[in-house]
């Protein structure tokens, strides 16, 4: 299996440190606002990676964090804490805000059939471990203290910038002046490990005692702390969005490797953005869509999952409601095929499962080419394999796709649709083909189609 590794900027053959065990860490959500489908593109792609590894025979131990403190509105230590901001917006406490949006996140991941992590860990439950890691960095001479925070000194970490491919001197040259909020900060690339409850944070609700003073952790320290606690000092795969590369993941590497002297992550797996009108879907631009928006447009969450499968995880993807509707139609077609195959009892005409399985595996093993894997699925369904063989093959593929096709069952047709279909049947019997055609169009507009069969009978299917 080959994966693109951001660290080396190349496709590499993946082999875990301790086969068949794979350690996988996912950067989880900052729970201060609603989870949107832009986030879900990343988590669906992470899930496809995980399912592919399992499909390939690996045993995956998956850890994901929940950021419920310390992530500022500016990833480079500018602005206010996002949880504090979210609490002001909702009128809830910061603790209730974190719980509410954490619950919404998992409601969304469940709706998209994303396999839950083996361990979900919250930043606020791991303050003790973060303080221990900061203490270790202090012993190594990699930190310094100002009136506002304890900082990691990036000038003391020689390989800082290796993930983004930008040298420290270039990062310093390109840094904006407005990063210097703390006059005691030595370099614009230095990042906070621990904020003190002073100045702009004097009223910060979440705070803990530390050897350096009362305060709260920076954003980056939590992921290093929790990944190493649960997965060890060197992990196989770390996932996240491409926006994490220049700061968050760069800083994770610096503090983790600075503390242990060991390689932190072997493979960095980064997902590209979901765009809307060629802009990144984001909370700050207020151009995002949630589960509720999908419901309003009569789009199932799994249709969005199917849509994401049709684009490579490293490519930008532009979202439109037209593409979502098309994905819904494609998913409905798949479900109808499953129902038809379950009813048919044809005998095998040939046996080509291994042929399609190999091509399916080849597509996924080449850096998760999911669109190619989807094409293999549709090609297989058009062959003269028996119904039983097609179902078995389809359900096998769906272990990676995660579309829940095996649970497809006959849908109860709404009474309104049945009445319209009966009216159309009468119109056809009376040779009133104009009315019959009008009723067909109306039925289609409501999301259903009619397949006419012998003796004026019919089948009703969702479009």
Image (cartoon, rainbow, N blue to C red):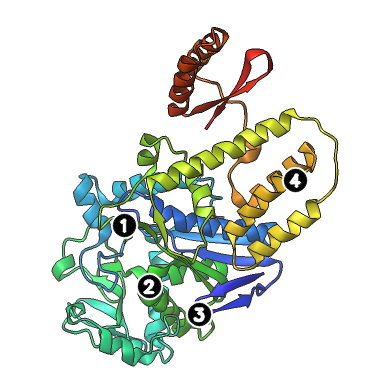
Q: Which residue carries the number 3 mark?
A: 7
Of callouts 1 and 2, which one flags the residue occurring earlier in the amino acid sequence? 2
Earlier residue among tags 4 and 3: 3
Q: At which x and y percent is residue 308?
A: 50, 53
Quadrant occupied by the N terminus: bottom right
Mark in the foreground, 2 or 3: 3
User: Dot 3: few (<14), some (14–19), or many (≥20) neighbours within 10 Å?
Assistant: some
User: Tags 4 and 3 in contact by the CB under 8 Å rule?
Assistant: no
**Is residue 111 visible to the viewer in this orientation of the structure?**
no
Residue drawn 69% across and 64% down? 362
Q: Nearer the viewer, mark 4 or mark 2?
A: 4
Q: Residues within 10 Å of mark 2 (few under 14, many from 20)?
A: some
In the displayed structure, 282 sits above or below 414; it is: below
Query: Which residue in the structure is indicated by mark 1?
Result: 282
Q: Which residue is mark 2?
A: 248
Residue depicted at 31% across the width and 71% down the height: 210
Q: How dense is the environment of label 4, judged by Cα within 10 Å: few (below 14), some, or many (20 and up)? A: few
Between disc 1 and disc 3, whose residue precedes? 3
Of 50 and 335, which appears nearest the observer? 335
Q: Nearer the viewer, residue 28 or 387?
A: 387
Q: For the point 65% across and 62% down, which residue is it?
A: 363
| Quarter of the image where one finds residue 266 | bottom right
Q: CA distance from mark 4 to mark 3?
A: 42 Å
Secondary structure state at the residue bearing disc 1: loop
Callout 2 touching callout 3 (CB < 8 Å): no
Q: Position of residue 66 (x, y in %)?
A: 41, 57
- The residues bearing labels 4 and 2 have C-alpha atoms spaced at a distance of 48 Å
Question: Marks 1 and 2, how far apart in space?
Answer: 17 Å
User: Whole-percent x and y of residue 102?
Assistant: 39, 49
Secondary structure, mark 2, is: helix
Q: Which residue is mark 4?
A: 383
């Amino acid at each position: 299996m080959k994966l693109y590794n951001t660290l080396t900027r190349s496709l590499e053959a993946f082999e875990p440190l301790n086969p068949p065990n794979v350690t996988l860490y996912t950067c989880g959500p900052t729970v201060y606002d609603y989870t949107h489908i832009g986030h879900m593109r990343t988590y669906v792609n992470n899930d496809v990676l995980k399912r592919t590894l399992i499909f390939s025979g690996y045993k995956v131990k998956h850890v994901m964090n929940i950021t419920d403190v310390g992530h500022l509105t500016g990833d480079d230590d500018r602005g206010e804490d996002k949880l504090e901001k979210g609490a002001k917006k909702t009128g809830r406490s910061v603790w209730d805000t974190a719980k509410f949006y954490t619950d919404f996140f998992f409601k969304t991941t469940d709706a998209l059939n994303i396999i839950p992590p083996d361990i979900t860990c919250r930043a606020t439950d791991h303050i003790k471990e973060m303080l221990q890691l900061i203490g270790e960095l202090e012993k190594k001479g990699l930190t310094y203290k100002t009136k506002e925070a304890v900082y990691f000194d990036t000038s003391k970490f020689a390989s800082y910038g290796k993930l983004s491919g930008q040298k420290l001197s270039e990062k310093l040259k390109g840094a904006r002046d407005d990063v210097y909020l703390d006059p005691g900060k030595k370099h614009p690339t230095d990042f906070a490990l621990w904020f003190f409850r002073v100045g702009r944070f004097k009223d910060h609700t979440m705070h803990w005692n530390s050897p350096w003073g009362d305060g709260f952790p920076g954003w980056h320290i939590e992921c290093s702390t929790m990944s190493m606690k649960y997965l060890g000092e060197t992990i196989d795969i770390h996932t996240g969005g491409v926006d994490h590369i220049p700061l968050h993941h760069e800083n994770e590497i610096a503090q983790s490797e600075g503390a242990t002297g060991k390689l932190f992550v072997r493979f960095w797996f980064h997902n590209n953005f979901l765009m809307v009108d060629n802009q990144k879907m984001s909370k700050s631009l207020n151009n995002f869509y949630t589960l509720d928006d999908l419901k309003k447009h009569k789009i199932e969450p799994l249709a969005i999952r199917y849509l994401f499968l049709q684009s490579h995880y490293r490519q930008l993807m532009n979202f439109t409601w037209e593409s979502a509707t098309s994905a819904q139609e494609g998913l409905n077609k798949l479900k109808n095929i499953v129902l038809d195959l379950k009813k048919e009892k044809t005998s095998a005409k040939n046996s080509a499962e291994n042929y399609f399985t190999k091509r399916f595996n080849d597509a996924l093993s080449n850096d998760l080419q999911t669109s190619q894997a989807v094409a293999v699925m549709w090609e297989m369904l058009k062959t003269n394999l028996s119904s039983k063989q097609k179902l078995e093959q389809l359900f096998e593929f769906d272990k990676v796709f995660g579309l829940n096709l095996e649970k497809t069952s006959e849908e109860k047709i709404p009474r309104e649709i049945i009445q319209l279909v009966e009216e159309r049947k009468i119109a056809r019997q009376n040779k009133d083909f104009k009315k019959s055609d009008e009723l067909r169009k109306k039925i289609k507009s409501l999301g259903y189609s009619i397949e006419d069969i012998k003796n004026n009978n019919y089948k009703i299917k969702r479009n």
